[in-house]
């Protein structure tokens, strides 16, 4: 039974880390798409 709290504490640590990582990735993707769109607009 002592293993469960350890796993739960790991989840408590990794959940915000994963959420932050996903947010950073989606923000980065949006930035890349925006730049690609701006570059496309300047080419035309």
Image (cartoon, grey):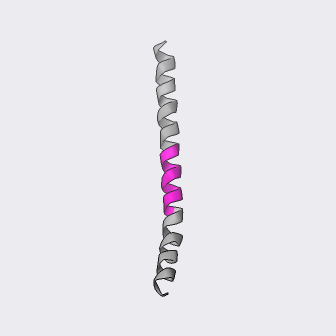
Q: Residue at x 48, y 54 (%)?
A: 21
Task: Where is residue 1? Give x, y as percent.
Answer: 49, 87
Judge whether residue 22 is colored magenta.
Answer: yes
* Part of the protein shown in magenta: 17-26
Q: Position of residue 27 (x, y in %)?
A: 52, 44
Which residue is depicted at the point 47% across and 73% down?
10
Q: Residue furthest bottom?
A: 2
Using the image, determine if residue 14 lies above or below residue 41. below
**Main secondary structure along the magenta-highlighted residues:** helix
Estimate the x, y position of residue 14 in percent, counting from the top left: 48, 66
Residue at 51% x, 70% y: name it.
11
Q: Position of residue 38 (x, y in %)?
A: 51, 24
User: Which of the two residues, 20 or 39, is positioned nearer the viewer here?
Assistant: 20
Residue at the extreme top = 44
Q: Is residue 18 above or below residue 35?
A: below
Name the residue located 48 percent from the left edge and 30 percent from the top edge: 35
Instruction: Reply above or below: 11 against 3.
Output: above
Q: Of residues 27 and 12, which is closer to you in this image?
A: 12
């Amino acid at each position: 039974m002592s293993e469960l709290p350890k796993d739960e504490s790991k989840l408590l640590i990794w959940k915000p880390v994963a959420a932050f990582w996903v947010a950073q990735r989606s923000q980065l993707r949006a930035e890349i798409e925006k730049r690609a769109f701006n570059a496309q607009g300047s080419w035309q």
